Amino acid sequence: MDLPQIEQKILKFWDKKKIFAKSLAKTKKGPRFIFFEGPPTANGQPGIHHVEARAFKDIILRFKTMQGFFVERKAGWDTHGLPVEIQVEKELGLKSKKDIEKYGIEKFNKKCKESVWRYKSEWEKMTTRIAFWLDMKNAYVTYENDYIESVWHILKQIWSKDLLYKGTKVVPYCPRCGTSLSSHEVALGYEKIKEPSIYFKLPIKAESSLYFLVWTTTPWTLPANTAIAVGENITYAKIKSGQEKYILAKDRLSVFEEPYEIESEFLGGALLGREYEPLYQMKLDKPGYKVVAADFVSVGEGTGIVHIAPSFGIEDMELGQKENLPQVMSVELDGKVKKGLGIPGEGKFVKDADLDIKADLKKRKLLYKEEMYEHDYPFCWRCDTPLLYYAKNSWFIKMTAVRQELLQNNSQITWEPAYLKEGRFGEWLREVKDWNLSRERFWGTPLPVWECEKCGEIKVIGSAKELPKKLKDLHRPHIDQIEFPCDKCSGHMKRVPVVIDAWFDSGSMPYAQWHYPFEDKDKIDEEEAFPADFICEAVDQTRGWFYTLLAISTLLGKGPAYKNVISLGHVLDVKGQKMSKSKGNMVMPLDVINQFGADCVRWYLYTINQAGEPKRFDLKDVKDKFNRFFGTFYNTFIFFQTYTDKNFKPAKKFGPKNILDKWIVSSLNSLSRQMMNGLQHYDVVGPARAFEKFIDDLSNWYVRRSRRRFQKPESEKEKDEAAQTLYYILLNLSKLAAPFIPFISEEIYLNLKKPRMPESVHLCDWPAPDKKLINKNLEEKMAVTRQIVALALAERAAAGIKVRQPLATLEIKNQESKIKNDKELLKLILDEVNVKEIKFNPELKNEIKLDKKITKELKEEGMIRDLVRQIQDMRRQAGLTRKDTILLNFLVSKFPNFQKIAEKWSEFIKKETLSQELTVGGKINFDLEKDIDLELGKIKIGIKKLK
Ligand SMILES: [Zn+2]
Ligand SMILES: [Zn+2]
């Protein structure tokens, strides 16, 4: 089977017949199933992880469509923000914000706007190729004026609720990008790093040779130190070592490396207010360089004495405000150490200046020791520069004020996997921080806030109409030129020259995609398109889009923005490493798809493990799916095509009578019930695996045991019954599989389709289970039957006896009640295990006992069966159809007894091999001759087709 080729054919069929559009038209009047598309940025190549998310979205949407829901699927593009700016900066060779300003903001933003579409066609191609049906023609685009206007409207609502404010806070800051970041952005970029930490000596004032021993991982912050903190109730020790004395926490004495003796012990409270000589004396505006108490001091690491630099740490700053500590800013906004303050390494990037500071302390004999320290440190999620914590002016949304509402709204959301709800996501909400919204950048939704230069009065704009003049483009730099006279004084109001976090854009998409409330108000107000019934993205979005969607709907008082969410595990490489361009371990989706087919990749992603678990993408596993699952499914369909007549007509009414038929029909309806229940709860792997198991049952039991009815039926009626059943099964399977593997299911459906059926499987209804056809009792009995068969065959294999060799008896221990009286089931066992008789014997030690004694008669029969198989092989080799009759000739000179045996078995041989004549000896012009080695001797066979 060439799956990629079949898929190309189906793609053309869908396109030509407009099947996607028809599926929407068909369901137009149905109940709505609302889906939000998380917008990707099209300025990078789509990767295999995008295929993952799209495959999981598609399956649910197709399922709901087949159930009669109307599922609008508006595509969207995320177009603003740092990722775009950084790429353009690189291309233009710009190194800093100053460079951009020199280049011109207008020109720069124009480049950004163009660059976001760079890979649009690749994205569309991939989306189409994997059969993710999405309305890409009417996509929302976050940079469009209408979109921006809706975002402004939202921000004004937030402002009028008093939840938007300007504040000075220590914020995570990327010195390369020149902007602060939000806590959810920081959460995206943590990496484990090893860097030197130092223990340094801080001379205590008015004492000789008495030091505080302090520990830090960021030597570059030491010039900004204005205090040290101790725990009031922690026990400290003063120790003597040689000529010097030190103070540190008693529980941390292990860090001290020389011999020492303890002189005294006391609680931290006793140290409060003690002053020390700073390492670097700065000009302070209030008293500093003293010991204060802080409850975050612990004895888990360090020395129990914490260095405080209020400019560079969130806790430090809060403590500084509480204790009224002075603040020193020793670093420029570009991350370089300020010049002219006498700091070692001035002018260097802070992480490089660490070395100069260490060298300086060493020279001054204030460095006690160095130690490598492994910890998680945040890096810029876009440019990989280590982030600095920095006191800055920013605009914030007061998320902390709506924490309870966030939690309350989250409680209404169903998560898959369920543990994320209270785990990763719930924890995030419980610890929620105010949202640092402003970015000191260029390409983004401008913050619609104007501030009076004179009196500080603030005005927030909620629509384009409120601007004094119409702008063609709402972006910077045009918007920066808009000024207002102040209402409160004679001053001018100027726009705060920042843009907003692009995550706010994407979180606004439920409203902004419809230009709410300026158009389509009912979509939101009447809940025609809000909230989403379903969203699905990768797990990193718990701190990204999953969060911002919920944050904004909560701020607006609209409840949760979505009801159900599938959060997917990341796709990793074979070794479990993150895929990245730099590592060269990226998997290009189209490569794999062109090799194995999109259906195969989709199926792999659905079945390899639970949706929420990380997936180690292994081509071997994909290939395995292809061979085992697709091969089996497709071959079963080919079997049906091969053995049913061209003029086969599905019966209008069909009531299976054969036990295998009844069983497979019952199993199919059980399967449909199981799949429906799973999918309704957003479980994809459960239903997919159940389907996979069914295909195995179908091929390796139903078809296997029904083969004779197709190939050598006793009557036309017998054959028709089997064919009706298999037709019913395959037709329903094509529908059950359609949401998962839309191509192969379409291929099978189109081949089985009869006039008056819908023209595509994707226009069919989901096959609801028919309770009347489910017979659990039979399914259980069949399971027992198969178990007995499996045990018996295992015993045969262990004894090295071929299945073709008949044996006398099989004894079964204690399944009497279930299958003893069911002749049809016993017949299945007789045939499959190839025994003459079944006996029930409760005295058995094991479940079954197989009589492995091969009598002369049994041996002979085994040989004849082997012979028949070889003749059938010859028929195939000679190119005969399964209806051609033959003349069969044996040359028995090397096996004289054979003639007698052949005579005895002649009727059987003739029937099985479709031979009309059976001759011995002689020489004719055969179609094919062959020497055959039978267990009891050698013969030569000739066959000839009879006209
Ligand atoms: Zn950066
Ligand atoms: Zn004013």
Image: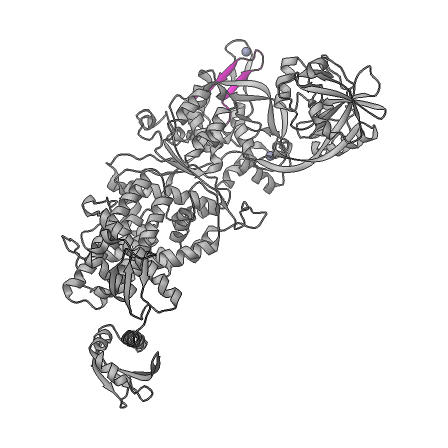
Residue at point 72% right, 30% down? 254
Name the spot of residue 506 as percent of width and height, x first: 45, 32
Q: Nearer the viewer, residue 678 or 153?
A: 678
In the image, residue 485 above or below residue 613 = above
Q: Nearer the viewer, residue 34 or 803?
A: 803
Instruction: Give the image quarter of residue 393.
Output: top right
Q: Nearer the viewer, residue 894 or 433?
A: 894
Name the spot of residue 924 as percent of width and height, x first: 27, 89
The magenta stretch spans which residues?
446-466
Locate ligand 2 by image quadrant: top right
Q: Is residue 465 magenta?
A: yes
Total tally of numbered discs in the picture: 0
Residue at the limit of the structure toward the bottom, as seen here = 922
- Horizontally, residue 149 falls left or right of residue 841, namely right
Instruction: Give the image quarter of residue 546.
Output: top left
> Do we see residue 784 in this rendering?
yes
- Quarter occupied by the C terminus: bottom left
- Quarter occupied by the N terminus: bottom left
Q: Nearer the viewer, residue 937 or 15?
A: 937
Name the spot of residue 943 as percent of width and height, x first: 27, 82
Residue at point 31% right, 43% down? 63
Instruction: Give the image quarter of residue 625.
Output: bottom left
Residue at the limit of the structure toward the right, as seen here = 243
Residue at the limit of the structure toward the front, as seen here = 843
